[in-house]
Image: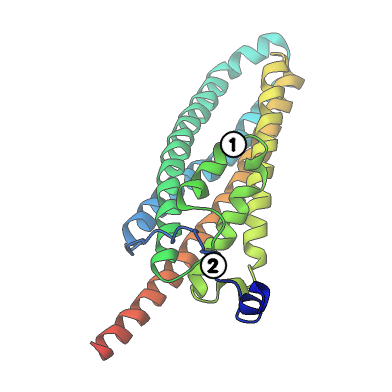
Amino acid sequence: MSDGATTGEAGPIFREISTAAPERRYRYSSLKRLTYAAVGLLGVKLLAAALQLPALGQRWSLIAQAASLSRAERSSMLGALRQSDAIVGVLASLFMVGVVASYVISAFWIYRAACNVRALGARGLQSSPGWAVGWYFVPVMCLFKPFTAMEEIWQASMAPAKWRLQRPPNLLRWWWASWLIVGFVGYIVLIIARSATNDIPGLIMSTQAQMIDYAIDCAATAIFLVVLLKIYRAQARTHASESQISEIFA
């Protein structure tokens, strides 16, 4: 009897052993505090942007009025223009504080949300918690990878065990589109501000561009707030349900 006959039908003696490392275990931690902190800081940013719109509108109106006056008559408006510029400057500073603080706390929020979905049972996600935040800082990849990571967080928050079957809502697409538009418009505004002259048409153009930028930022911030709250509530609901089941079978 040949060697082939003794091993062919019985199958190979040595089988390939899977060497894939098991997924890291994560511990669930409530998003409540991070969510409240993010909502508060994003609220400051949103409020500053909303207040900036009428402030810039007033400056635009004053500059347009000055265009119809003689040089001698414009000197009487200098006080009002300086006051308007001071208000715009204070609100711009408040807005920047809100931007920096809200971005930092949102990064912690995204990382924790990504950890939580794994603690709740989601497996096979493509972006790790670290990369769910890290993709925002990688050139080119920052245009689409943060969105796919947030999609996974959303899907896994709604149904951890069957997250692939969940269909991401249009809300996430609106959020990401608004985020990209804010970045693009902000870049255009920066170019306009640097190239604008100190004449009246240049000042009006710069003011109008800033108003558009703040208006889009208000919309983007409001959408992101809704995304945060929905994911937070979904994770809290799933965790509460699992805790009740564990108590029943304890």
Is residue 136 shown above or below 177?
Answer: above
Place residue 125 in its image quadrant: bottom right
Snapshot colouring:
rainbow
Q: Which mark is residue 153?
A: none
**Between residues 102 and 60, which one lies in front from this camera angle?**
102
What amino acid does circle 2 point to? Phe
At 57% from the left and 55% from the top, the residue drawn is 149
Q: Position of residue 179 (x, y in %)?
A: 63, 46
Can you identify the residue that label 1 sits on?
138
Q: Position of residue 27 (x, y in %)?
A: 32, 62
Numbered disc 1: secondary structure? loop
Q: Is residue 10 left or right of residue 250?
A: right
Q: Is residue 219 left or right of residue 40?
A: right
Label 2: how many Cα within 10 Å (few below 14, some 14–19, many 20+): few
Can you identify the residue that label 2 sits on?
14
Q: Residue furthest top?
A: 72
